[in-house]
Amino acid sequence: MKSTMQDAPLLISGIIRHGEWVYGNKKVFTVTPEGVNEATFFQVAKRAEQLASALERIGIRNGDRVATFMWNNQSHMEAYVAIPCMGAVLHTLNIRLFPEQLAFIINHAEDRVIIVDNTLMPLLAKVRDQIPSVEYIIVNGHDETGVLGDTLDYETLVSAEEPGYDWPRLDERSAAIMCYTSGTTGDPKGVVYSHRSTWLHSMASTSANSIGLSERDRCLLIVPMFHVNAWGAAFTAFFCGTELIMPQMYLQGEPILKMIKDLRPTISLGVPTIWNDVLRAAENNPDADFSSLRGILAGGSAVPRVMIEAYRDKYGIEVMQGWGMTETSPLAAVAIPPAGTPKDLEIDYRVKAGRVVGGVELRLTADDGTVLPKDGRTVGEFELRGPWITGSYFGVDAPDKFRDGWLRSGDIGTLDGEGFMVISDRTKDVIKSGGEWISSVELENTVMAHSAVFEAAVIAVPDEKWQERPLCCVVLRPEAQATAAQLRDFLAQRVAKWWLPERWTFIEAIPKTSVGKFDKKVLRAQYHDDLLDVIVLG
């Protein structure tokens, strides 16, 4: 027996048509040095149609890759709409990559066009002579430097066209967007999202069991639009009518506090390092006003308990912890306490990596592939599958990343019967000491609970007796003081004795990856090269 349901393709253009019609008066706000620019969803959609016509006029066709090298702003949103809806492939370039990585990604994707914000031209200029596939560079904003050679002006191109581009009826499984992993191990790998996967991911983001975005929300989009499509929020906004605040390059604690106070978001998305800086700025700002926020979503790395407690206790803000990867689009789990959880126990759920969202299957496996029990105690590697989970990488064979149709996450931890994940570590970061595992994540979060500590990262270093031992790298708060012995005593009350680090170092800042995570490979290299002043406790 066959279904009689209509078989309409799930296309990004369908999301956009819905948003511009039903939520046409909703707004995109872009923060600028002069103030805040505003545009309605309807206006953004119409300008996207003009951009599509302009791209077609210069030769872009179905399947061609068009890259963006931009901040979070209205023009970037227009590109988000125009490029996939016309049948081309949107490739968001990470503006914080090293030049050699940037050139590698552009060449690997074979981008034909790059749209770049004028403030970022000097960064792109470093690789201009290394990217032969790029035929046109379109500059958003005035190009007065000429550092990129011949360029096209974004506004001139768009304004020369008329609205009314007829979005084609595409195969829902065709490529819509490309993102590359950050390349923390080996070369970055390309993940290609389909129209179908993006549509389904957007729908999942509106669920109250996940982020719960709706037309009642105004979202401060701190997470970069080059970081897994701003965690999917940009497309979800058109799907459900959530207004967007685009902060551009103003990503420090003080300007973010001003945006929250002036523009009144109800939710905001960003990595924990950003939210830690917002807390720092708020401590010295009696006018800090978080009253509009129903919550914040933090993800990309583990969220320390002390941060969740600070937002809850000082400002009445609930922190939702989200978990995912470039390969998972990225929404895979969100840590929302189960219904009926006593208020004083909610944080025990919020500190977990997340609860698997509907649409994603999750399992725990041993090294040999044996599926492990979901008992909240057994430790293994998380593996995933689902309609917005990648099944392969673009142009690269990576058999070690997949097993029997499941994506191997590289994260290890426990999974319980309610679907909650607790991540102990990344497989490449876990510390094996005397044959037993030590969680660097748990050590970091526990050290950061000390009032004098701003940030802490723990890495494995060689040890003659135990094979590996933890080295704790600490950034103290301004004007705060604490010794290695004091911090170890603090830890001794909270973790197993044999976990306690003998090696400590105090540094000015923890190096970050291009997406704001702790860059432990840099710390390992600094230790190897004797660049860290290490204190060894007896």
Image (cartoon, grey):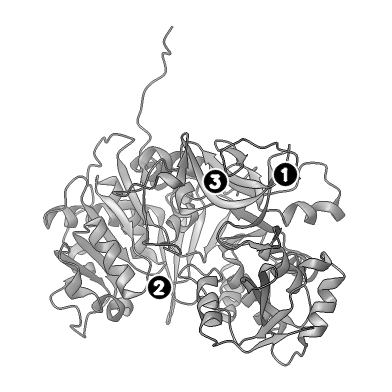
Work out whether mark 1 precedes mark 2 in sequence or the reverse, and give the earlier one. 2
Instruction: Please name whichever residue, 22 or 452, is drawn nearer the observer in this view of the structure.
Output: 452
How far is the residue under mark 3 from the one under mark 2?
27 Å
Q: Secondary structure at mark 1?
A: loop
Given the current orientation, which residue lies at the most extreme bottom position? 479
Q: Is label 3 or label 2 in front? A: 2
Q: Position of residue 391 (x, y in %)?
A: 41, 40
Residue 141's place in the image compared with 186, above or below, is below
Residue labelled with disc 2:
96
142 left or right of 185 in image: left
Q: Give the class, few, some or many, for how many residues have Cα within 10 Å of label 1's Cα (few <14, many ≥20).
A: some
> Quarter-wise, where is residue 357 in the image?
top right
Of tags 1 and 2, the one toward the viewer is 1
Tell me which amino acid carries mark 2.
Answer: Arg
For the point 16% across and 48% down, which residue is it? 61
Q: Is residue 519 visible?
A: no
Q: CA distance from mark 1 to mark 3?
A: 30 Å
Q: Are marks 3 and 2 in contact (CB under 8 Å)?
A: no
Q: Earlier in the sequence, mark 3 or mark 2?
A: 2
Q: Which mark is residue 378?
A: 1
Q: Are marks 1 and 3 in contact (CB under 8 Å)?
A: no
Q: Could you say whether the residue bearing mark 2 is in a helix, strand or loop?
A: loop
Q: Which mark is residue 205?
A: 3
Residue 467 image offset from top left, x and y in percent:
65, 67
Which numbered mark, 1 or 3, is in the foreground of this view?
1
Whole-number angstrom distance, CA of label 1 to CA of label 2: 37 Å
Answer yes or no: is residue 115 visible.
yes
- Quadrant containing the N terminus is top left
Q: Position of residue 230 (x, y in %)?
A: 46, 58
Q: Relative to 509, does residue 428 appear above or below in the rendering?
A: above
Tell me: 533 left or right of 94. right
